[in-house]
Each structure stands twice: as structure tokens, then as C-alpha cells.
Amino acid sequence: MQPTLADIYAAAKTIRGVADGTPLVPSPYMTDRAGAEFLLKLENMQPIGAFKLRGACNAVANVQEARGVTCCSTGNHGRGVAFAAAQRGMRAVICMSELVPQAKVDGIRALGAEVHIKGRSQDDAQAEAGRLVEEEGLFEISPFDDPLVIAGQGTIGLEILEARPDVTTFLVPLSGGGLAAGVARAAKSINPAIRVVGISMDRGAAMHDSIKAGTPIEVEEVPSLADSLGGGIGLNNRLSFPMCRDLLDQVVLVSEDEIYHAMQVLYYEDRIVAEGACVVGLAAVLAGRITLDGPTATIVTGRNLDMNVFTRIVTGQDVQLGDITVKGRPYAA
């Protein structure tokens, strides 16, 4: 069953003291550019450096009679599951594709989890997680299609509205849809008039393409500055797809060039080191794809990025993404 507002409040109690209470701060530069107050929810300040800890903690806390936990992940969900499992003394095996940056693989191993690298897609990693469930008795925690995970991510929406009940628009990074579904459920349950916009990169945007097709579909995964937004949503998706389809008011795509510039903006104007996935909300506003009519909040989802790539971006150098080159440019406000 889809999680309710009551489930999100219950999740807030479960994760309290471990994965809650991140700052909500104004961005004066983005406020000036957007023509409306622009707020940043700093989930990059979580203990694992990403919002995924919320859903992982809520889900792991409810695991019983299993030999351990497993998941497939593009990085931050795996880190969250590894952290939550370690706190409970549980075995954790994180399944990832070859496209996941090495920095994220190393970060998960540092938390004591095992990492299995399989193939070049999330589908390959998902198959390995399924094998671990069948053959080794592990309990699988989906990065997005799990009611406890969605409820955990939804606590971000609660916190934003507790701090600023006048927010009129949420700009939410969109990948498998767990974050967008949870935040939209929380926000619209409290105030149905709130607009929730999902934002992704314009290459390999699985949820966007699935909503457009009317059913979950496969997409080709390609390297992106917003690598955390990569991966499919699962052809048997039962929760995050229908929730995003029904609850999101709009889905917007941004280019790699626009993500590159927005990462520079967040760094130079707000002094924040963040992944490309974090800045898609800023990128959409800066590119003129979204018009704001009141206080707006976006989620700075994580800081677990390849610092070599980040350094190239903030110093205006080219970045190679598979078969494309994102041309560098010095930052200019």
C-alpha cells in the first residue's frame, strides 16, 4: 500500500536523532534570480552526506528474521543502508553497476558493507540483489519502491513545512521517485495547493520517460554529472511510479551544461559542495524552465561526489562524460 501522512509521521519518530533535523537556509543569490524566496534544505549535512539515510534507517529498523540486508544502488542509498545496518550489527551487501563513481564505492566499503559490482546498469545490480535474497536469505531494501523508504524520505517535506508553512513550491530531484513520492505525499497531504516539481537530467531520465509512456519503461543509462539520478525505476514498480505520476504537478529536464553551471552557482554563491543531482532545481530556475510565485524550497540531496570532477567544474575545466564533453567555462554570476 502507498504510504500515508501517518506513515511519514511514524517514520519521523523512528529516525529521530539519527537522520533528521537538517538546516533549511535561504539562498540570497537564487532568491534574486528567481524573483521569489529560494530555500535550500541541506540534506548534504546528514551523517552519510545524503538524504538517503532517512529511508534506509526507517526500513532497516523494521527488518526482522533476516541474515542481513541488501540493495542495489547508484551510491547514496547503499551508503544509507550500510550505515543503518552497521548501527544494528547487521550484514549489508550493496549491489552496484560499473557506472557508479569509485568514490561512492569506497565510501560504502568504509562503513563496513560488502560491495558487489555487476554489469553496466541498475538492472544488472538489481539481479544480483535478487540472487542474494534467494540464495543467501538477505532482505532487500529498494532504493525507492518501498513504503518504508518512501515514508522516510517524506520526512523532509514535514521538516520543511514545519519550518516554513508558507512554502508554495517544492523542487525535488527525480530519479527512482522515492524522494519525490514521499515529499509530494507529505506536502500535498498538509496543503493540497502546494506545487511539487520533479527535476532530472535530460539523458536517461527513467521516471520522466515512464510517466510520459504511461507505464514503467527501461532507459539507457549514460554517464551524467547528476549520476545519483541515474538508473531505472523497475518494470514492476508498484509504488513510486504511480505516486509520482499522480502527485507531481510537473516534471522538468535540464542539460549537462545547465547542471555544470548550477554546481558552480551553489559553490560560489552559497559556498556549498554538492553533487550534480542536488542542483537540478537551481538549474531549472536559472534556465528559465520554471516560474516561481512564492517561497520555494529545493533539496540539496548529497555531497558524495568525485572531488576531482568537482574541482574541474568549479575551476571551469572540461568534463568528459562517456562520449560527450561538457565544455568548461569560468564562473560568472
Image (spheres, rainbow, N blue to C red):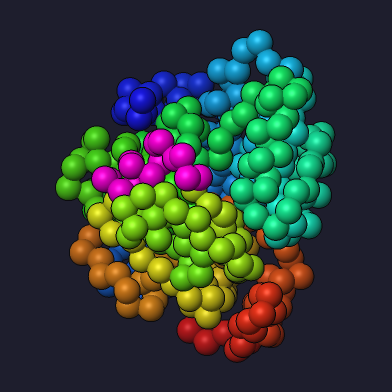
Query: With 133 as the anchor, is 293 left or right in this view?
Result: left
- Name which residue lies at 48% across and 27% down: 148
Numbered marks: total: 0
- Name which residue lies at 62% across and 12% down: 64
- Name which residue lies at 69% across and 24% down: 134
User: Measured from the top left, where is residue 107 in percent x and y?
Assistant: 77, 47
In this view, 74 is above or below 1:
below
- Taking depth in this image into account, of 144 and 282 the one nearest to the observer is 144
Q: Which residues are magenta?
A: 234-247
- Taking depth in this image into account, of 193 and 266 the one nearest to the observer is 193
* In the image, residue 243 lies in the stretch drawn in magenta: yes
| Furthest residue in direction top, as rendered | 65
In this view, 197 is above or below 177:
below
Query: With 190 as the anchor, is 275 left or right in this view?
Result: right
User: Measured from the top left, where is residue 172 in percent x and y?
Assistant: 40, 54
* In the image, residue 306 lies in the stretch drawn in magenta: no
- Name which residue lies at 31% across and 28% down: 5
Query: With 20 as the anchor, is 252 left or right in this view?
Result: left
Quadrant of residue 231 within the rendered picture: bottom right
User: Measured from the top left, where is residue 255 in percent x and y?
Assistant: 48, 76
> Would residue 98 be seen by someone viewing this image from the given angle?
yes
Query: With 265 as the anchor, is 241 left or right in this view?
Result: left
In this view, 54 is above or below 310:
above
Quadrant of residue 80 within the rendered picture: top right
